[in-house]
Image (spheres, rainbow, N blue to C red):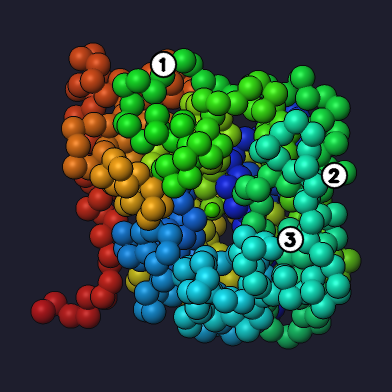
Amino acid sequence: MMKQPNILWICTDRQRWDTLGCFGNRFVTTPNLDALAASGTAFACAFSQNPICSPSRASFMTGRYPRTTRLVRNGQQIPADENLISRLLANAGYYCGHAGKLHLAPGQPPRAIGSERRHDDGFSVFDWSLHPPDIPSAYTAWLAERGIQHKREPVEGSPYIEFGMPPETSNPGWTAQRAVDFARTNAKSERPWFFYCSIEAPHNPFDPPREFLEPYLRRLDEIPLPRYTPGELDNKPVFQSSDRTGAWGGTNSGYYAAEKMSTRDHRLIRAAYWALIDHIDFEGGRIIATLRETGQLDNTLVLFMSDHGEMLGDHGIYFQGAYFYDEMIRVPLVFGGLNRLQPGIRSSALVELVDIVPTVLDAAGVASYPGVQGKSLWPILTGQAAPDQHREDIYSEYYQSIPTGYKKLGGAYLTGLRSDRYLLTVVHGRDDGELYDLASDPPQTFNRWADPQYQAVKIQLLKRLCDRMADTIDPLPPTEAAY
Ligand SMILES: [Ca+2]
């Protein structure tokens, strides 16, 4: 019998879907991830279940919705009875490793010193880092052992971006190197392995290595400005106009306030963001090359995705918050490597990140368990199912997920439903919401929530949203008998 496939899961932080060449971005240089997509399936319409780090990560690492895992906001620890994919695979005999960000527990000192608090996560190798170099971690220890000082240098004329560390000593480079070392060490192992390579980029600070940023600075005038129509926020939930005056729900007044930025500021931030994407591609390429050199690529499922998006000035907002625009929750999702995959599939199916865990379990030939709520993509990856059909709609939640955000506004509690045609957002506890008709308004600019012509559609969508809230209730504990 053939050895079970290895699993390499590369997760980035705040990388929106339209950032890879294979998804149509003509500025970035992403040959390695584009080639990975060509070897398997590129999902163009994959959505995260929450726009904030910890709730999204707890959800996609368990295959369960944020409200089901109960980790709904940053600063909470995932409950001890939740099973990560690494735990499920370790139970089945996999050797599991991790590097970089995990963020399933508070990351802020003194709650986290050197590492976040772990639960029974199944990882045998665990090299944690978060917000380098400000928080002590395996990465800062690694730098210190080598006598390397973490430095950033200003980019002339911008308070928003910097030149970061060179690739080989940068945090993304360090994280990728842990994956390279793990893959080499275990190349001849009898046991299949799982590695979760969690690269904390293109998250701010926007500090790419000089060699990746400079090419963009030379063609700065070509970089498109954010999509923003003056006045578009006037009839939208108040969280958005608030974030326009300072990102992250007003936790830092005036911080990355799009309303204060010049066209040059916008272009420089986009340049740095895309340069970080190019850096991610470079590091991903090194890991994939290692798998190829060690003869493991054909038997390794390589999966690339991100935890949520980044507004990047679109709709007049930077960073992330209480909204479900495509910029916010639509992410790249690519599966490749493993030679059992059908190559060259492009899927426009609506996919949720909760669908990844059952897909990985199917690839590994490991039985699922009753708590998993996602729906496997394995039939699409292997060419057994039509690539463009998977779900009727996707569901996402925000329950005061940035705990310090929107305090002056009484907090933010929202749920959202995105179909092929519409995006509906409900603000709970207020008579407010959003409705976008993607047929006439693909950029999601004009809110139809109160438009008389859209009231019948709105009621239908509200019913569908209610259905999703009902069917995302925890299937656990299992039903063991008729009574
Ligand atoms: Ca994040």
- Residue 191: image quadrant is bottom right
Tell me if label 1 and label 2 are in contact, CB under 8 Å. Answer: no
Give the Cα separation between the discs numbered 3 and 2: 14 Å
Is residue 20 shown to the viewer in this render?
Answer: no
Query: N-terminal of the two: label 3 or label 2?
Result: 3
Structural crowding at the residue carrying mark 1, measured as other residues with C-alpha within 10 Å and reported as few (<14), some (14–19) or many (≥20): few
Q: Secondary structure at mark 2?
A: helix
Identified at 46% across, 15% down, the residue is 230
Give the Cα separation between the discs numbered 1 and 2: 37 Å
Tell me if label 1 and label 3 are in contact, CB under 8 Å. Answer: no
Direction from residue 406 to residue 449 in the image, left or right: left
Q: Amino acid at mark 1?
A: Gly
Q: Amino acid at mark 3?
A: Asn
Identified at 63% across, 84% down, the residue is 124
Q: Which mark is residue 210?
A: 2
Identified at 41% across, 43% down, the residue is 249
- Residue 30: image quadrant is top right
Direction from residue 362 to residue 278 in the image, left or right: right
- Residue 270: image quadrant is top right
The residue that disc 1 covers is 231
Give the Cα separation between the discs numbered 1 and 3: 39 Å
The residue that disc 3 covers is 171
Q: Amino acid at mark 2?
A: Arg
**Percent position of residue 99, x then y:** 67, 70
User: Which quadrant of the figure contains the C terminus?
Assistant: bottom left
**Percent position of residue 391, x then y:** 40, 44
**Percent position of residue 262, x then y:** 63, 22
